[in-house]
Image: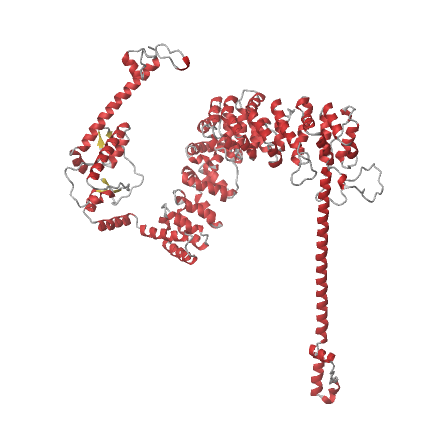
Amino acid sequence: MVKLGKMGKKPKKGLGTKKKAKNVLEKKMKGMKLKTGERKKAKKMEERMHLKAEINANVKQELARFKSPKHEEEDDTRDSINSESSFGSQPKRIPKKRVSFAKEMLHTKVFDKSDYKSMGQEKSSKKKVKVDEADKENLKTKGKEGKAAEKKESKDEEEKVDADETEGKTIVAKKKKPIQVTKKVKEQLLSMPRKERKAFLRQLKAKKNPIADRALECKKLWERIRSSKTPKQEVDDSIGKLVGLVKGHAAKLVYAHDTSRVIECLVALKRPGINNLLFEELSSEIVRMTKSKYAKFFVMKMLKNGNRHQRETIMNAFRGHAVSLLRITHSAEVLETAYNDFANAQQRFDIISEFYGKEFVLFRTDKPRTLEEIVAEEPSKKKLITQHLEEIIQTVIEKTTIRLSLTHRLLLDFANHCDAEQLTNLIDSLKDKIPEIIHTQEGSRVACKCIWSSAAKDRKLIVKNFKDLSVKAAMEHYGHRVLMAIFDSVDDTVLTNKFITSELGNEIGKLIDDQWGERTIHSIFHPRDGRSMDKQELQILTEGDSNAHSKKNKSDRYAEVYKAICESLYLYVAANMEKLIFQQNKPKFVIGCLETTSQYDLFERKVSSEYRKACYEAIVELAKREFVPMDSECYHLIEHDAGHFVLQGLFRCDPNLPEEERLSVALAKGVPSSQLGGWISCNKGCHILLKMIQTGGASVKKIVLDSVNKKQLKEYAFKGAMLLAEALENVNAPMQSLAVKQVRSDAILREHCSANSDLFRKHPGAKKEDDEMLEKIDIENLPRAQKRFAKQFEKMNMERVAEIFKKNYMNIRTLAALLLLVVAIYTYTIVSVTQETFLEEIDEEVALEKPETHGHLMPAVPPKDNTWWGWAKSWFV
């Protein structure tokens, strides 16, 4: 009986009568008919199963041999690392770090520190022999058979642990690093007590590394120096001790991973005496240190913190070794830093010229030259230079050194002077590495040249390599040029849109926020637009116009790329219009998105009416907000510089659009009439209304005419009001008669308007009662916008008056202080002069010495004044 399925569905025919085969082998065993592909698949599966069975048998045989007592005898005569199994001889395994305790190690044993517990005890003859670690590694290299052996061994070890636990023993598994020693040393260690064993190992380590104790002391002092809890006095003492330990041994300490940081710490202290001491000791090791993984940091520290003489010494040491330094990853980073950050023009030329050939190393020139100048002077050297560059480049681009700007400089020199065959080989080497070289100016030039010179097949691979990297490339200073080159030259726009344009559309907001990302998006809807691109970029992109591999028409290629990003672009612009205009200040971007095709565009750009209306609705919503002239807190759309620029730019496109898609029509219908009439209170608002009359239809003219108060409009004296009044008077005449050239608006109010503001001044043609006095007006009778502005003006005037009074008060105080100072100085001078009696004293002395001849010089004694005035005068004197 056949069961019906759910929802009354009929059962499938043959369901339940025959059993399906699980795989192709079961089909073959049941005698079912196989297809050609299934036969091949079955044959491969049979071969795989046969190989698997053979491997399992070999593994079992090998494990049985390990467990046999004969294996212990073989261990005495054969090295466990170089052991041979039934799989054949094992290749020599190079350990990551080898710690040896003997000078000659012909036969080595792996000695695990976990065997310390069993030292001194007799081995039980019944104890199972474990497989050595080296043998395990050999088994792992054999694939599945090694995995099976590991599983079996781990199972045996688990059983052994369980047995020990039942006996009441607790085993703690600790992974300790094995130490390789000779068999003789191992036997000697096994017979030693624990303390003697440690001392013996310490002695062996000292023989291997004589400065181990010194390095340990250096690290302890280094830890004190860099600790924030160490007192300053102790830090200074530790620095002195550390310098004493390092002095004379820096050449050995600088190459270790730990002690090299100690020396870097001393250099980072920026103490000239210490830096000079270390540099003099290590100056002969500069090239060797540069090639070291850890010592290179000392060279970089000296480039950064050293003086001019030390930097020149390092640069001179690199002379003749630049090629070998670039081939090594560690030294290439140091050479890159020295080339970009610390070398002058002559030193850069010395480094670059070494890659042109050995001749430039032997015969050094004092005048820096480019490769173009060298080839122009000696054309015969061009072939040798390109051959030498090609040889170096082929070895460098396979490493991480391909990301260095020095490598990019060599790539650009080679690409500009090589022949067609060499350029093809270069493209084959770089086509899957283009995203790694576009972050520098030279690298982006090389990438563009590879795109222009590569065939369609290679271009597809280049485009695919930008998957998940196109957004990052678009935000690069030089990387966005490569994307522009792809948009310009790659004919397969479907592939371009799939791997690049779609990713750009998904991150459209992030790109518009970025300077270079915005330029990339702008180049999609306005290719080679001088408003967003500089002259240098335009010249670079022009070089690819004559490439022989681009067959499709440019306009078609641009249109297809633009179509792929339209939806995400215009939806973002419509949703973030306020942010783009007021916050990010991107009016050119908004206008470029929405403007119509002009004679300067490279393709016919058509914006869908749906997208255009959505963007215009966002602009209308901004225009609906309450208009307050000169509101410094938040300018209105028509008064904001960027907003006014956007409106004027989009109004220019209205004559080329249907009436229902025009911005002037959208504003006239969307903004209330009362608010439109309030725009006449500022110059920019009058220009906006004037532009709406000029570009809109009859309906727009009627709405503007009904909204504007002509009587109030004539009271304003700025240029926009005069032009708007003239346009409204001739609104019924043909608009061609209004060939009025738009004048840039004069600001209604300048910064902190003066008392004689022109805002409420009458039109010059109006009658005035008194030309010297402003007309008296009642603020309460003004419109709300002007009323608010008048109150703001009154408040500013009061603040200005208060500030003037404050300044006057301070001036008066200063003047009074100066007057008092002058009077005090004058009084003091007069009193001091009146008190000088040295002449009378001299006459008195002469009269006393010679009374006969000079007695008349004796001063007369004034009578004593016993009044209060005389007493005060005498006291004062």
x, y (%) of residue 421? 46, 25
At x 22% / y 45%, what residue is drawn?
A: 116
Quarter of the image for the N terminus: give it. Answer: top left
x, y (%) of residue 627? 69, 35
Question: Image quadrant of residue 15?
Answer: top left
At x 42% / y 58%, what residue is drawn?
A: 233
Quarter of the image for the C terminus: give it. Answer: bottom right
Q: Is residue 313 left or right of residue 635?
A: left
Q: Is residue 178 left or right of residue 122?
A: right
Q: Is residue 552 left or right of residue 862?
A: left
Seen in the picture, residue 730 relative to 406 is either above or below; the reply is above
Please indicate, yes or no, whether residue 603 appears anywhere in the rendered image.
no
Question: Image quadrant of residue 27?
Answer: top left
Please indicate, yes or no, whether residue 504 appears anywhere in the rendered image.
yes
Farthest residue toward the left?
Answer: 125
Q: Nearer the viewer, residue 338 or 750?
A: 750
Seen in the picture, residue 270 relative to 451 is either above or below; the reply is below
Q: Nearer the viewer, residue 464 or 607?
A: 607
Q: Nearer the viewer, residue 235 or 180?
A: 235
Seen in the picture, residue 351 relative to 543 is either above or below; the reply is below
x, y (%) of residue 682? 72, 36
